[in-house]
Image (cartoon, helix red, strand yellow):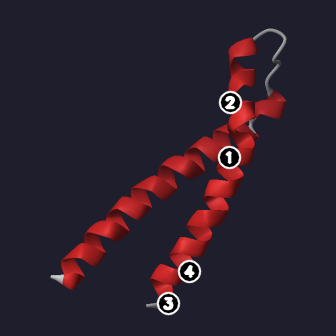
Amino acid sequence: MYYQRRVIWTKILVIITIIISVAYLSVCLLPFVNTSENWVMAIPGIVFPLLVVLLLLLIIVWAFMKSK
């Protein structure tokens, strides 16, 4: 039972990590977009600090998951 729960949580964590990593990488491409022509692309730049914090938290969570 414990093993099944761990597998499910690991799969959920992998999906969350992929989503946050893709969002982070897409926000990192913003300096190459001309925001004066396409102002909608500037909005995700506001989320950048939150994505950095989430990635750091995911690194800590993965370190604890791998240590067990």
Give the side of residue 43 with respect to residue 63, left or right.
right
Q: Earlier in the sequence, mark 2 or mark 3?
A: 2
Q: Earlier in the sequence, mark 1 or mark 4?
A: 1
**Residue 14's x, y, as percent?**
42, 62
Residue matched to label 1: 50
- Front of the two marks 2 and 1: 1
| Displayed quadrant of residue 5 | bottom left
CA distance for labels 2 and 3 = 34 Å
Q: Residues within 10 Å of mark 2 (few under 14, many from 20)?
A: some
Q: Residues within 10 Å of mark 4 (few under 14, many from 20)?
A: few
- Front of the two marks 1 and 4: 1
- Front of the two marks 1 and 3: 1
Mark 4: secondary structure: helix
**Residue 61's x, y, as percent?**
53, 72
Is there CB contact under 8 Å for labels 4 and 3?
yes
Looking at the rendering, in which quadrant would you find the C terminus?
bottom left
CA distance for labels 2 and 4 = 28 Å
Residue matched to label 3: 67
Is there CB contact under 8 Å for labels 2 and 1?
no
Mark 1: secondary structure: helix
Tell me: residue 29, above or below residue 68.
above
**Residue 31's x, y, as percent?**
83, 32
